């Protein structure tokens, strides 16, 4: 039998530590954590797809949809409340994901990956051509407010940090619950044997559709948080390198736990920051070497190293 | 014992290019019958099961299950109607444990709306599935990944998964293939005992004539995509053409 599930307790502990740390962290670290946790939320959606053997190489689509939904809601509807905007980002991505899902559910393997990439590049192309949305330059997102109050830049940043930590914890908890349900457990079942799932009376495509919408919702929320944190959005959010980075983080993290993508994303964020700072000309090479090392030595991702240590203890 | 027709197959034909895999099959199977299908390799036995369960679509003909046409329905809908099957090559979730395999099957047999979002490893389900594993006498393997258990265990797991739902009509595709000769009867005893209480109609494909004689009250002999003989086991197995084309001359 697997070890007793401590995910809930670990999640609660991590939540408290992160919120407390928010009061002490320097400004650059607060930004780093916000962006890393947001990226972790997207990777969490990818983890669910990974478990079925599917790789979306276009998750940046929903990430960008979330970002642009926030930008447009601020620009056209004068909405600035950070919670409302996050919900709008989730809703926009969920709707799009539900629609595209009808097509995506029919594909597997490389075709699934390429189709998802195609959709994201389509959206990228659309953004680049749209002059009213700033074309390649994008546009600035107004400073977010909370419950109608406009606070100082510092307080706003702290609240956005807390909101991101809460969103990450909520997302992890929700996905953890989902993975324990029959539908959630069908992910591995699907990777193992799709014919049997069909012969047990369930449509394999439906599992994939649900996963796809879940991934879209998470990426949309993360895109919204990122847009508010950066204060600016541009089409690079939808570009394939963004998707590649998200897949990179998912492989780095491993699929062993809903906490893994956050660990992986934080490591990635630190790696990127320091590599850029100390070796700006070769930082991409450093990332490449790190990915190679993970694939060769830790095929289960960073999380598997943690588990290995725990098993040894 | 037996009563109204549960399955009515009429003029069922399947062509794979120029190969006739099913040729004008006409057969009616009544409730609670136990039917054995025999035939040489390539005689169309598995094709017949694949056609009825929606894995492949016929070139012509009709398949009615309790009056409802099955042709054109996908396997999942046919399964939901109560036509279940096990496979010649066990179709299990190889990286999941034996217990989890059965729990997935058990969970998916729940027809309630939103049932997919109930916990997989609920206490009730774990108990019910552990019970089912002991009925099939494979409880010793419950926590082993399905890929790592003996073939006979995997075979029984495959059958247990097919029967997790209250099937009205159950197809077993060579339930004893890949099992050592001395264990075949034991396996069939387990399966038949497990099914006896269910009042299910059972159709099984079998190569071993001793098994056919013992468990199949009615025998369908397939040859070149068509039914060569259909009747009580003793009659069919004694039929001269069946002996020539299916069972060989060893009993002559």
Image (cartoon, rainbow, N blue to C red):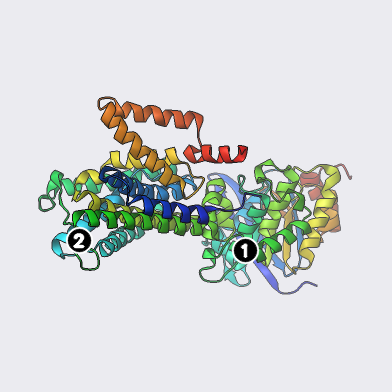
Chain hosting mark 2: A
Please state which of residues A225 and B181 is positioned toward the viewer in this rendering: A225
In the image as oriented, which residue stretches furthest toward the front? A24
Q: Residue at x 31, y 53 (%)?
A: A161
Residue, disc 2: A151
In the image as oriented, which residue stretches furthest toward the right? B252
Chain hosting mark 1: B
Side of B177 where A311 appears, left or right: left
Please state which of residues A168 and A255 is positioned toward the viewer in this rendering: A168
In the image as oriented, which residue stretches furthest toward the left? A131
Please state which of residues A21 and A219 is positioned toward the viewer in this rendering: A21
A292 shown above or below A184 = above
Q: Residue at x 69, y 71 (%)?
A: B5
A117 shown above or below A146 = above
Residue A205 in view: no
Image position, residue B235 (x, y; %): 84, 58
Mark 1–mark 2 contact, CB under 8 Å?
no
Give the structural element (helix, strand or loop) at label 2: loop
Asked if both marks, 1 and 2, belong to the same chain, the answer given is no
Q: Residue at x 12, y 49 (%)?
A: A134
Q: CA distance from mark 1 to mark 2?
A: 47 Å
Q: What number of labels is visible?
A: 2
Graded by Cα atoms within 10 Å as few (under 14), some (14 to 19) or many (20 or more), the crowding at tag 1 reads some
Image position, residue B2 (x, y; %): 77, 72
């Amino acid at each position: 039998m697997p070890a007793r599930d401590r995910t809930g307790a670990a999640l609660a502990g991590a939540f408290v530590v992160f919120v407390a740390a928010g009061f002490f962290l320097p400004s650059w670290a607060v930004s780093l954590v916000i962006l890393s946790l947001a990226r972790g939320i997207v990777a969490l959606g990818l983890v669910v797809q990974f478990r079925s053997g599917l790789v979306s190489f276009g998750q940046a689509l929903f990430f960008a949809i979330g970002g642009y939904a926030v930008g447009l809601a601020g620009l056209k509807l004068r909405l600035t409340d950070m919670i409302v905007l996050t919900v709008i980002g989730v809703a926009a991505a969920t709707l799009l994901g539900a629609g595209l899902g009808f097509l995506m559910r029919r594909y597997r393997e490389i075709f699934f990956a390429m189709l998802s990439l195609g959709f994201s590049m389509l959206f990228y192309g659309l953004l680049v051509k749209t002059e009213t949305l700033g074309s390649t330059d994008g546009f600035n997102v107004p400073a977010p407010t909370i419950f109608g109050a406009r606070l100082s830049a510092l307080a706003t940043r702290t609240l956005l940090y807390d909101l991101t930590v809460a969103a990450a914890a909520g997302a992890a908890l929700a996905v953890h619950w989902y993975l324990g349900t029959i539908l959630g457990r069908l992910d591995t079942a699907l990777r193992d044997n799709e014919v049997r799932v069909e012969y047990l009376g369930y449509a394999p495509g439906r599992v994939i559709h649900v996963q796809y919408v879940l991934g879209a919702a998470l990426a949309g929320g993360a895109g919204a948080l990122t847009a508010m944190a950066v204060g600016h959005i541009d089409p690079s959010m939808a570009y394939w390198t963004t998707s590649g980075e998200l897949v990179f983080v998912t492989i780095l993290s491993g699929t062993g736990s809903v906490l893994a993508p956050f660990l992986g994303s934080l490591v990635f964020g630190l790696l990127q920051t320091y590599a850029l700072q100390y070796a700006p000309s070769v930082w991409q090479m450093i990332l490449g070497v790190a990915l190679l090392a993970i694939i060769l030595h830790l095929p289960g991702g960073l999380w598997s190293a943690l588990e290995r240590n725990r098993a040894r203890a | 014992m037996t009563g109204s027709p549960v399955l009515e197959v009429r003029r069922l034909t399947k062509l794979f290019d120029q190969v006739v895999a099913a040729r004008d099959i006409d057969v009616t199977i009544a409730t609670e019958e136990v039917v054995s299908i025999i035939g040489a390799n390539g005689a169309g036995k598995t094709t017949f099961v694949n056609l009825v369960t929606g894995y492949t679509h016929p070139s012509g003909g009709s398949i009615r299950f309790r009056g409802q046409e099955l042709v054109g329905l996908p396997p999942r809908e046919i399964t939901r109607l109560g036509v279940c099957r096990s496979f010649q090559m066990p179709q299990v979730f190889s990286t999941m444990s034996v217990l989890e395999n059965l729990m997935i099957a058990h969970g998916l047999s729940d027809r309630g709306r939103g049932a997919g979002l109930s916990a997989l490893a609920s206490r009730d389900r774990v108990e019910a599935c552990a019970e089912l594993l002991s009925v099939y006498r494979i409880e010793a393997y419950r926590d082993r990944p399905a890929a790592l258990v003996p073939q006979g265990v995997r075979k029984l797991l495959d059958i247990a998964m097919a029967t997790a739902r209250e099937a009205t009509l159950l197809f077993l595709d060579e339930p004893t293939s890949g099992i050592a000769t001395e264990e075949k009867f034991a396996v069939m005893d387990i399966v038949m005992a497990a099914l006896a209480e269910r009042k299910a109609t059972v159709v099984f494909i079998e190569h071993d004539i001793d098994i056919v004689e013992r468990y199949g009250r009615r025998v369908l002999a397939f040859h070149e995509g068509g039914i060569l003989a259909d009747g009580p086991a003793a009659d069919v197995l004694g039929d001269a053409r069946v002996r020539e084309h299916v069972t060989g001359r060893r009993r002559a």
